[in-house]
């Protein structure tokens, strides 16, 4: 029984890491897979960017893509994100994230329904 549980646990863990969540994405950020695509969060002292990537970590068409961000802490705080040519630029800097416990990015591609990706703060490759 214990062997079956350990095997199941290892199989499920490998599935999570197969999507790149345990290492930096192609832009050096934190990756989540909310659906049939990846969301990469790149936060620095200067700015925060969100990339939408296909299953092979290639940039997707931004024409019908949307991103919204919110921070959770003592109270929720919406963050404005602006669509650029290859990513979304969000109005929050890395040092400002420390005041919050969690960050949620709701994204959609090609006009599909939005899907949420959650990041625990401090950000880590888990």
Image (cartoon, rainbow, N blue to C red):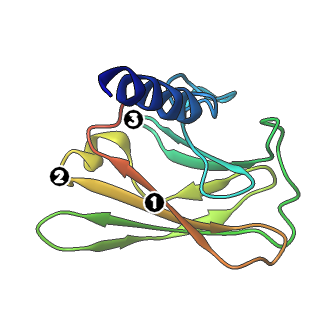
Quadrant position of the N terminus in the picture = top left
**In terms of sequence position, does the residue under pointer 2 or pointer 3 come before the other?**
3
**Residue beneath the point at 53% across and 35% down:** 16
x and y percent of residue 126 in the render?
Answer: 40, 30
Helix, strand or loop at label 2? It is: loop
- Observer-nearest residue: 120 or 96? 120
- Observer-nearest residue: 29 or 46? 29
Q: Quadrant of residue 35?
A: bottom right
Q: Quadrant of residue 98?
A: top left
Q: CA distance from mark 2 to mark 3?
A: 14 Å
Which residue carries the number 2 mark?
99
Compared with 48, 79 (above or below) is: below
- On residue 45, the disc is 3
x and y percent of residue 21 in the render?
Answer: 53, 33
Residue found at the far left of this picture: 74
Compared with 125, 52 (above or below) is: below
Would residue 77 be found to the left or right of residue 46 on screen?
A: left
- On residue 91, the disc is 1
């Amino acid at each position: 029984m214990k062997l079956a549980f350990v095997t199941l646990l290892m199989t499920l863990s490998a599935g999570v890491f197969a999507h790149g969540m345990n290492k930096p994405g192609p832009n050096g950020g934190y990756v989540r897979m909310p659906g049939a695509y990846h969301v990469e969060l790149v936060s620095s002292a200067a700015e925060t960017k969100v990339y939408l990537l296909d299953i092979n970590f290639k940039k997707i068409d931004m024409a019908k893509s949307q991103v919204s961000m919110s921070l959770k802490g003592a109270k929720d705080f919406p963050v404005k994100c602006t669509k650029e040519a290859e990513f979304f630029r969000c109005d929050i800097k890395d040092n400002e994230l420390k005041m919050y416990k969690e960050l949620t990015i709701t994204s959609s591609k090609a006009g599909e329904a939005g899907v949420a990706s959650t990041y625990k703060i401090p950000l880590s490759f888990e």
